[in-house]
Image (tube, rainbow, N blue to C red):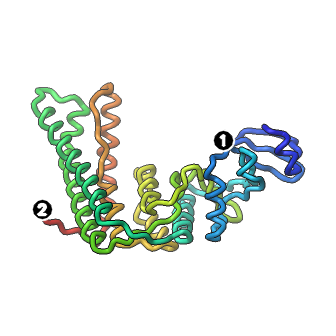
Amino acid sequence: MNSEILERYNLKVNKCSLRKKIKIIDTDNGSYVIKDVNKDKKVIYDYLNTREFYNYPKVINDLSNDGIEICEYVEDFLVPKEQREEDLLYLIGLLHNKTTFYKEMSLDEIKKIYEDYSNRFYYLENYYLDLQNVIEKEEFMSPANYLLIRNISKIYYLLYLGKNYLEQWYKIVSTNKRFRYCLIHGNIDASHLIENSSVYLISWDHAKVDLPINDLYDFYRKNYKNVDFKRMIDIYRLKANLHLEEEYFLKFRLCLVDKVSFIKSEIEMVDAVYNLVCYTDKTLDVLKQDTKEPTYNK
C-alpha cells in the first residue's frame, strides 16, 4: 500500500483488513476500500457523473495519477436474495435509461450479425444431429448419452424457436436500422450490489458502451436456475424501455444452447448434460410466457 498516496488525502491508517478479498482501511476520517484501477475507470466514472448516475461508492482520489482507487466503504445490509436481484435489475434499468443513445447500423453490419447467428444455430443443430446418430448406434448407452437422447427433441425445439426469433429480429432491424446503445455494467451479479440507505453498483471493470441486452443476457445465463426472469424483465422495464427488436434479440440469444463435448469423465458428462437439459427446460418455460409468438417462413 502506498503510504505517500494515503497521506496526500489525509488518510492515517488505524487498521487494515480483508473482507471478501477486498482491502479495507479504517482511518480517523472513516473506512475506505483500496483497489487496483485500470486506465478506463476514470472515464467510466466521469461519464456516469455527466449522466447523473451516482449509484456507486464515492471515489476520493485522482485515478489518473495515483494508480489505485480509493473509494468510501459502504456497509452492505442483509437483504433477501430475491429482493437483492430485483433491486439489481431496477438499478441496471436506471443505468441503461440514463446513458441511452441511438446509433444507426449499416445494412452490411446488420446482415453480418444475422449471418453469424444463423451459422451458430446451423452448427449447433447439425452438431446435435450428428451426435444423436452416433449415440443411437450404441448397443448400451452411457448414462450421459441416455439423458441427452431422452431430451434431444427439446434441444431441437429451442434451437428452432431461436431461428424464428432471429428471423423476426432481422425483419425489423433491416428496415429500422437504429439501435439503442448505453453504458452496460458488463458483469451484473447480486454480489455486485450494495444495499444501504441507497443502492450501489460495484465492480465496474467490464463496463463499456454496448447494446443493453448484453447485461440482461449475462444476468440470465448466471441465474437461470433460480430466478423468475419474466419478473426481472418487468422490473427492468420500470426504468428502461425494451423495444420489440430487443426482445427478439434477447430471446434468440437465450436459445443458443451450450455445446456439450464428450471428452470428460462420465460423472462430469452427466453433470454437463444435466445442466444442458436444465437450461433448455427453464428457457422453454420462459419463452412459453411470451404472448408474441414468432412466425417463421423457411
Callout 1 amino acid = Lys
Q: Residue at the location (46% across, 66% down)?
A: 181
Using the image, determine if residue 121 lies above or below residue 131: below
Q: Determine whether, in the image, residue 269 is placed left or right of residue 179.
A: left
Q: Residue at the location (56% across, 71% down)?
A: 98
- Camera-nearest residue between 149 and 218: 218
Image coordinates for residue 142, horizontal then vertical, percent = 22, 28
- The residue identified by callout 2 is 298
Q: Mark 1, residues whose alpha carbon is within 10 Å: few (<14), some, or many (≥20)?
A: few
Image coordinates for residue 298, horizontal then vertical, percent = 12, 62
Of mark 1 and mark 2, the one earlier in the sequence is: 1
Q: CA distance from mark 1 to mark 2?
A: 52 Å
Q: Determine whether, in the image, residue 42 is placed left or right of residue 60.
A: left
Q: Residue at the location (52% across, 67% down)?
A: 96
Image coordinates for residue 29, horizontal then vertical, percent = 87, 53
Quarter of the figure with residue 99: bottom right
Q: Determine whether, in the image, residue 167 is placed left or right of residue 100.
A: left
Using the image, determine if residue 20 lies above or below residue 224: above
Secondary structure at badge 1 equals loop
Label placed on residue 20: 1
Image coordinates for residue 285, horizontal then vertical, percent = 31, 59
Callout 2 amino acid = Lys
Secondary structure at badge 2 equals loop
Q: Residue at the location (36% across, 66% down)?
A: 105
- Camera-nearest residue between 77 and 263: 263
